[in-house]
Amino acid sequence: MTARLKSVIDDFLRRESAAGMILMGTALLALLISNSFARDYYDGLLALPIAIQIGPLEIAKPLLLWVNDGLMAVFFFLVGLEIKREVCVGELSTRDRASLPLVAALGGMAVPAAVFVALNWGEPANLDGWAIPAATDIAFALGILALLGPGVPVALKVLLLAIAIVDDLGAIVIIALFYTDQLSVTALLIGVVGFAILMGMNRAGVTRLTPYVLVGIVIWVCVLKSGVHATLAGVLIALTVPLSAPDGHSPLRQAEEGLHIWVAYLVLPAFAFANAGVALTGLSFEDLTAPLPLGVALGLFVGKQIGVFGFTWFGVKSGLCRLPTGVTWAQIYGVGCLTGIGFTMSLFVGTLAFESADQLNEVRLGVLMGSTVSALFGYVILRRTLGKAPARTPVVTD
């Protein structure tokens, strides 16, 4: 690993770790407000209607949906930039590098979904939430790693980062395929034309970011009106941003570095504040063990660790991939536990899966339970295993 690449990765991890701490604070604030005298003010703020109209074109949504459809499109734009960079020059750029996080992330999506479906099979109204525990919150997970201090191997941090990025890619595909409303063909076609224009700009060597942003806003509006979830526009736009320019600078890295601080300290905290509020007063044991919250919680806590660790073990033993140097199986298990911190992405998928206030409240409860236990368990496992060197394979000599 070159010194420059290591510096970029370390800087990224520091920012994501700080974002995780802020997410914890904003989520806690939303919980406190939701269980205080200010609950009605909180609900009223999220229901505040905001409209933008240009001629016959009108976008009218409550503040909550402006956060979920608008600000989160910026987050997904950043995710798209990260995915493109990792695929082109990063940890997913070669088969050797990509095989382990791909295998681990596949298990980390499939097993939690299976756990959720198994626990909700008798509740058909809940089955739309099967993808909720399949997501990982990268900021929260890296925030927990930051609490462990400088003893965490860089290879372990990079592995968690790569798994989370593949996880995000899987979530994007799931949203596109399973959480799309009835389509408006006209709006979708205009969006496709806009995407083709961006691709043409990329081929023509346009490296200034402003044209991509301006056309991107038009694409976002079209995708929003088409019935496809608007956040997917952010990913599509990101894929057209050039990785490099003739003068040696990288428009993609420029956009990524410029957006990180806004996403870390504004977009994700705003989303957490708007979506983490759950009323805990009057909750009974039966409420906690109802199929929907239990399916989400156990999908995150049990499904994630079994899926990530189990698929990783199978991949290594079958020769499909290999463990990073200096990383133990116990540490892989700890990372598998941390991937059960679904928070932001799980809450987001929950808002797509359900409209009922009762179901959304149960989803929030399940996400909070599963993410909290996963964070605590992963922290304890890694705290006990860090610093222990992996067993060396004996060298056989003639």
Image (cartoon, rainbow, N blue to C red):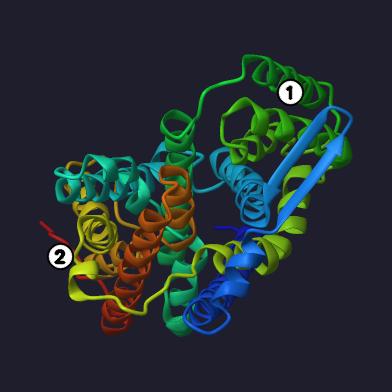
Local secondary structure at mark 2 = loop
- Assess disc 1: are there few (<14), some (14-19) or many (≥20) residues with their C-alpha within 10 Å of its C-alpha: some
Q: Nearer the viewer, residue 57 or 207?
A: 57
Residue 389 occupies which quadrant of the picture?
bottom left
Q: Amino acid at mark 2?
A: Pro
Q: Residue at x 40, y 63 (%)?
A: 364
- Assess disc 2: are there few (<14), some (14-19) or many (≥20) residues with their C-alpha within 10 Å of its C-alpha: few
Q: Nearer the viewer, mark 2 or mark 1?
A: 1
Work out whether 385 lies above or below 316.
below
Q: Residue at x 35, y 74 (%)?
A: 372
Work out whether 197 lies above or below 72.
above
Q: Residue at x 73, y 18 (%)?
A: 190
Which quadrant of the rendered structure holds the C terminus?
A: bottom left
Give the image location of residue 256, x and y in percent: 71, 52
Q: Residue at x 23, y 56 (%)?
A: 295
Which quadrant of the rendered structure holds the N terminus?
A: bottom right
Work out whether 363 lies above or below 43.
above
Residue wearing tag 1:
199
Q: Amino acid at mark 1?
A: Met
Give the image location of residue 375, x and y in percent: 35, 74
Residue 394: assigned label: 2
Q: Nearer the viewer, residue 42 or 177?
A: 42
Local secondary structure at mark 1 = helix
In the rendered image, is residue 173 in sight?
yes
Residue 373: assigned label: none
